[in-house]
Amino acid sequence: MHAEGFDRLEDKESQATERPFKRFKVRLKAEIVTMGVPVEPTSQAGQYVAPQDWNALIAAPDVVVIDTRNRYEVKAGTFEGAVNPELDSFREFPAWLDAHAHELAGKRVAMFCTGGIRCEKSTSLLRARGYSDVFHLQGGILKYLEDVPEDQSRWLGECFVFDGRVTVGHGLKEGDTTMCHSCGWPLTPEERAHAQYEEGVSCQHCFDQTTATQKAAFRDRQRLYDAQAT
């Protein structure tokens, strides 16, 4: 039984070999994952599409599939054929939509994100701007990976998650990706073998963006972290 105000809460469960969060923290916020423009997600969101019906929808020739996540999340994995808006922040999405409106004219639009939260807002924005056939993946990527068998999946790669696991794959199993603690990009085993990768210090995506002084500070931070972990 849910407490008052949480009667519509949809809880999700998955497993981890180690504690994925360092601490439990609750904060009251007026809004999460803001786009910087007013939307009405409780009354004007897109149509939910269950994970088992998602493949058929995104395979249709009149459907444009849009990944609403930030570029570092998309880098870890996305749906086959999905459009990547190359966002550094969700606030950039309205401007991206304005610039690409002509590409969506006469199309049905299917949108997805990690757990479904961002799509409540992005689909609401589209509907507010006159798009009628707007859909989003119910429960997000995580529910899709949980419910759809891997041999039937149209998902490519792994799904970035905001905890110590970094990514998960089909069946919500922990992925092979780790995070660069300098720039935050998810790194595959092959990228961690690159000459410019140094744990806690740099990777091939950020090596040229930090100074020697910054790298030295990152090394000190990594040594402290390693000492605390032992």
Image (cartoon, rainbow, N blue to C red):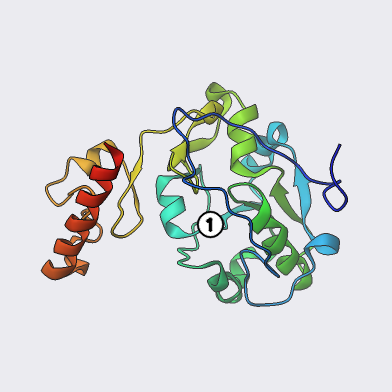
179 left or right of 11? left
213 left or right of 89? left
Residue 191: quarter of image: top left
Q: Which residue is mark 1?
A: 69
Q: Residue at x 44, y 58 (%)?
A: 71
Q: Residue at x 22, y 53 (%)?
A: 203
Where in the figure is residue 49, as x and y percent of width and height?
74, 42
Q: Nearer the viewer, residue 151 or 15?
A: 15
Q: Check the image and report above or below for 35 versus 166.
A: below
The N terminus sits in image quarter: top right
Q: Nearer the viewer, residue 72 or 129?
A: 72
Q: Residue at x 31, y 54 (%)?
A: 181
The C terminus sits in image quarter: top left
39 left or right of 165? right
Residue 224 appears in view: yes
Q: Check the image and report above or below for 64 versus 95.
A: above
Q: How many marks?
A: 1
Helix, strand or loop at label 1? It is: loop
What amino acid type is highlighted by mark number 1?
Arg
Where in the figure is residue 160, as x and y percent of width and height?
47, 45
168 left or right of 180? right
Where in the figure is residue 201, as x and y percent of width and height?
21, 55
Where in the figure is residue 15, as x and y percent of width and height?
54, 29
